[in-house]
Image (cartoon, rainbow, N blue to C red):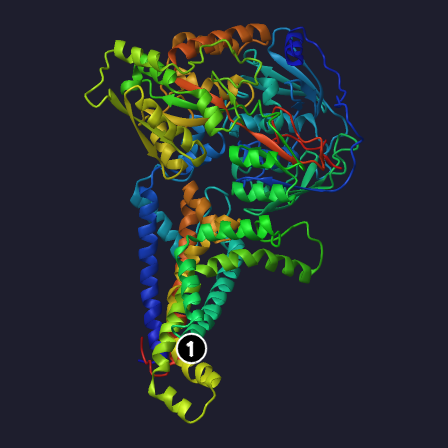
Amino acid sequence: MSKFARFLGGAALAATVVATMPSAPFAEEPKRGGTLVQAIQNTPRHLNPAVQSGIATGEPGTQLFASLLRYDESWTPEPYLAKSWEVSHDGLSVTLKLVEGATFHDGHPITSEDVAFSIETVKAYHPFKSMFAPVEQVKTPDAHTVVVVLSQPHPALLLAMSSQLLSIIPKHIYGDGQDPKTHPRNSENVVGSGPFKLVEFKRDQHIILERYENFFIKGRPYLDKIVMRIIKDGSARTIALDSGEFMLSGFEQTPRDLNRLKKNPNLNVSNEGYAAIGSIVWLAFNTKQGKTADKAVRQAISYAVDRNFILKALMLGTAKPAKTGIHPGSPFYDDSVNGYDVDLDKANKLLDDAGYAKGSDGMRFGLTVDYGWAIVKPYAEYMKPQLKKIGIDVTVRASADFPTWAKRISNHEFDMTMDNVFNWGDPVIGVHRTYDSDNIKKGVIWSNTQQYSNARVDELMKLAGSTYDLDERKKYYAEFQQILAGELPIYWLFAGPYHTVANKKVGNPPNSIWGTSAPLDRVYLK
Amino acid sequence: MGLWSTVAERVGYGLLLLVAVLILNFALISIAPGDIADTIAGDMGGADASVIEEIRTRYGLDQPFYVQLWRYLSRVVQFDLGYSYFYNTPVTTLILEKLPATLLLVFSAQILAVITGTLLGVLAAKKPNGAVSLTVTFLSLFGFAAPVFWTGILLIILFVSIFPLFPVAGMMDVTVEGGFFVKTLDVLHHLVLPMITLASIFLALYSRLARASMLEVLGADYVRTARAKGVPERGVLYKHALRNALGPVVTVAGLQFSAVISGAVVVEAVFSWPGLGTLALQSILARDTPTIMGILFFSSVVVIIFNILTDITLRFIDPRIKSG
């Protein structure tokens, strides 16, 4: 059992985790000082992750704002702003003790009031409603104690209190009555609680961060400064990483660029981490309209698609297979499900038996496959020649841009689509939304656009989402994955190959489950 | 017609054009599938249905097209370009933040293209069938035919990757410490590749134009007279002929200004140049209507002003023009 499992098992017994910052065995003593030039891929809308999710805000946001907990690379929660936490016997309340002496970047102390305010703000304004939905009340018995009162046991709570999902924001600034979503301090004069404070934010250019000297972890962060350069173009980032102009870049996923960078002896190219981001690339089916409403058709297509070919020829060995909707790096991933390894005979037989006879041209029927952005285009195009082998005439529908695609898919006007969806930590946050029959919502992208509904699956998600017992949750999620793999609302292909590219001069390159969307206070320059 | 009445007429037409530009573009953006709620949700890795609903109501996207258009136009009349949906910042602020970078790129590229183009054209016109002329023709056609993003990437590979002479992207290196002079040098250093890339498309145009126009002028009687009376060849070329040959170049340079701005969109994307082009691309992809409209408004104004300035310049170069 992993540490994660031990912790969650212990949580029900009201175990208390006492604060000691676990430190990885360093090969050498971290050095203080220096400026890290990091590449990020998109301009964030603003810098306040409490009201804006997404990686663009997460990478700078987790430097500016601290969360209550943080996670290492093996899903172990660690103290961060909370030095200890304790789940009550009935699982209906969580008591957290805050680090004493912690201050915001303007010197105001960080108190339980701020934490309560942050949780309430995130609950009301963050786009992921499932994170804090069961939170009924946040009590603040004293300045350093927070009691979160829940309407039902809520195992996703701990992950929802880490990284960019729960940023502790100052009440004295954001509590001034203005709408937090459009608050002017979201991008200017940001007063955070994290290891770095904001010096300058220039859209489409850079974000400059500087060490917060009174950060609550003594001696950290090691870096004087982080300069995040916003470079959308992948080849430009590759060249700059190659030449040493940039020292660090996270969330890199273009196979050709990655393989090129791996050849550079000055760089560490690592796929460690990102399990909580949980990016999965998949082929989604419309389970209500058209030929794909027939399970046999979906199964035949899945048998016809050669996942290994995609991994080898299109991903050039940079990605790992994902056989279900839960990321393979998650403790809940069930590897025993049917992965539909390629079998053209079986695929053809399934279609024959279901009564789809081949016409004189060798074709049974036609289907469309959509894609919305460049990186998933090759997989969509691969479907055409491959599915021709089982007599399905595939038309690849390109969309001019993301909103065009989102419009089609969210209005259920599609047969099949390539997609890339994130788990966002606990399955409750990012997995349930795709299969929950209550979440079939026209016009909402990344809802249950497959329109899949199964009462048992709904029930399993409810059960797994309301117990802290890891083994029980694993059991529920295993059945959940088995049913889904049988009914195939989606054919899951592989885990998005996020990599962190770091110059060898960078010590402790981030490798947590949140990748580079996590505090860089341990990073240093050799 | 006098100069001022011509200018007044042009300004009048310009205003009409602006209204047309705004209405047409607003319609075009509304026709495009998807809206800002989709992109905000996309940017956030998905969002709850209530969040998407709220975004649509907040920005009035649930209203019919004509209501949205009317609201927008009545604000623009009061010189209010509105708030960017995506960045939640006044559009004017966003544009003014980006405008200097684009103007720097566009002007330097335009000046580079006009000057080198003209000089190359003159050089080629000296011996219309000589080796120089052929090389100039070949090079300029090559630059004209090559897609601008391709030229840009090629230059990056050559001068960043293979011979690391220039920085790969952006407009400045924020880690550079130093005074105004050092920082200016740094910006110029970043400017070189994008400027050459953008200029490469127009170089062809100007050199071909200058060449043709020079050839025509060099055949004229007054050039023969100048030569006959013993004016040195250099004087004939640059004093007598060039000034007269410049007319078409200036006209086209003025009219091409809009093309330079649209070329800048692509060049900015390739070099991550933080200008209006990058902003335009981002806002189109995000369906950020107020920002796209604001940029189109600004660039229309700039193009109209340039057309008027071209008219005036031409009058100075060629006093025979009385009204355009």
Residue at 63% x, 18% y is A75
Q: Nearer the viewer, residue B251 or B99?
A: B251
Q: Nearer the viewer, residue A185 or B99?
A: B99
Task: Tell me the amino acid under the disc marked 1.
Answer: Lys
- Could you say where residue A2 lies in the image, as x and y percent from the top left? 65, 12
Among all residues in the image, which is located at the extreme right? A29
Q: Nearer the viewer, residue B315 or A354?
A: A354
The vertical placement of B232 against B280, above or below, is: below
Label 1's element? helix
The vertical placement of A80 against A525, above or below, is: above
The C terminus of chain B - image quarter: bottom left
Circle 1 chain: B
Residue at image mark 1: B126
Give the number of marks.
1
Q: Residues within 10 Å of mark 1 (few under 14, many from 20)?
A: some
- Could you say where residue B90 lies in the image, as x and y percent from the top left? 49, 49
Q: Toward which corner of the image does residue A263 lie, by quadrant?
A: top right
Among all residues in the image, which is located at the extreme left? A360
Q: Nearer the viewer, residue A418 or B16?
A: A418
Residue at 35% x, 30% y is A370
The vertical placement of A512 against A36, above or below, is: above
In this picture, residue A423 sits left or right of residue B178? left
The vertical placement of A490 against A33, above or below, is: above
The N terminus of chain B - image quarter: bottom left
In this picture, residue B33 sits left or right of residue A364? right
- Could you say where residue B277 lies in the image, as x and y percent from the top left? 46, 52
Q: Toward which corner of the image does residue B37 lie, by quadrant?
A: top left
Residue A188 seen in the figure: no
In this picture, residue A64 sits left or right of residue A121? right
- Could you say where residue B291 lies in the image, as x and y percent from the top left? 44, 48
